[in-house]
Image (spheres, rainbow, N blue to C red):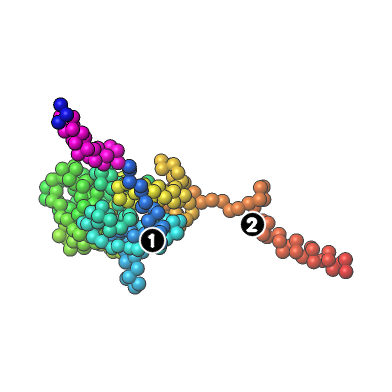
Amino acid sequence: MKIKHYSLIILVFLFLPIFLISPASAAPVADTSLADIIAAGEITVGIEAAYPPFEERDPETDEIVGFDPDIMAIIAKDIGVDIVWKDVSWATIFTSLASGMYDCIISAVTITEEREETMDFSRWYYKSTQAVMVKLNNLKNISTIDDVNATGIKVGIQEGTTSDLYLQDNNFTSTTVSFATINLAIEALNLETVDCVLGDYDTLNAGKTSQPDTFDIVDTFSPEDFGIPVQTGSDSLRLRINDVLDGLLGEDEDNPVFTEEYNDIYKEWMGGDVYGYVEKPPATIPGFPIIALISIIPVVSIVLVRKSKKRI
């Protein structure tokens, strides 16, 4: 009996460490994503700088410019850090985030359920829609997205984008021709090696604007929201980003209130006011326009001067 008793004690001591370090009893790992960025004084951001007007390289300075960099600049300023850009290919942009190559991505990334399985998203910061672009001669008479779904149609897309996923999810019978960048897809359309190109409206419109006598956008489909992905569990960084975006767009995501700062960025890169933007009226004193106040200042000054002379 004593032998069995001692054996039981030995077994308890052997297995006790396993219970002590089991996941159920382990303390949760603290999220230091934002604190680490503040301590480093910089935020590292992944981007594919070949998707105008959202992001591209300035041909003269080689700096990364566009709608997304301007939004990221506001976020970085709020945190109080500099931006370190990592210009990477779209094919590896998400896996590189997961491996820790950068803190977040801002690169016209559509929020999807599939992507949310491997990364965490901020709230939306841009409302987009997919579009169909053709050459003006439009040899296949494509006028809607439904026309694209036909045998014999060659569709140019950037691989791994939501345009690519849309064709797959809806079992299109057309032939998909994949390209590393959207610019290569547009060039293929120009050379007529594809019959149309699918992509985000504003990006295709930028291509159309650069060659107005070459391309036409004939249809839009699939509204989408762009968000800023961070590594799974980086809640402190994600929430800080959300705070900044709330300040630009309002806290109610279903009823945005666009600020002048956001609209100015939108206007610079998209060519007009964001839909739904309401310009604030000029500042007033209750019942008295400020412009009227400014206009009477010279008159008041003259009266005061004359009165002072009379007293002398």
Could you tell me how far apart the alpha carbons at marks 2 and 1 are, in whole angstroms?
47 Å
Binning the other alpha carbons within 10 Å of mark 1 as few (below 14), some (14 to 19) or many (20 upward) gives: few
- The percent position of residue 59, horizontal first and vertical second, equals 32, 71
Between 76 and 184, the residue placed more toward the observer is: 76
Give coordinates of residue 121: x percent, y percent: 33, 47
Q: Name the residue under label 2.
A: 291
Question: Which mark sits nearer the N-terminus, 2 or 1?
Answer: 1
Q: In this view, does 280 lie above or below 309?
A: above
Q: What element carries label 2?
A: helix
Q: Name the quadrant of the C terminus.
A: bottom right
Q: Give the range drawn in magenta.
A: 4-26
- Residue that lies at the very extreme toward the left in this rendered image: 152
Can residue 246 be seen at all in this image of the molecule? Answer: yes
Position of the N terminus, as image quadrant, is: top left
Q: Which residue lies furthest to the bottom in this view?
A: 60
Q: Mark 1 points at which residue?
A: 40
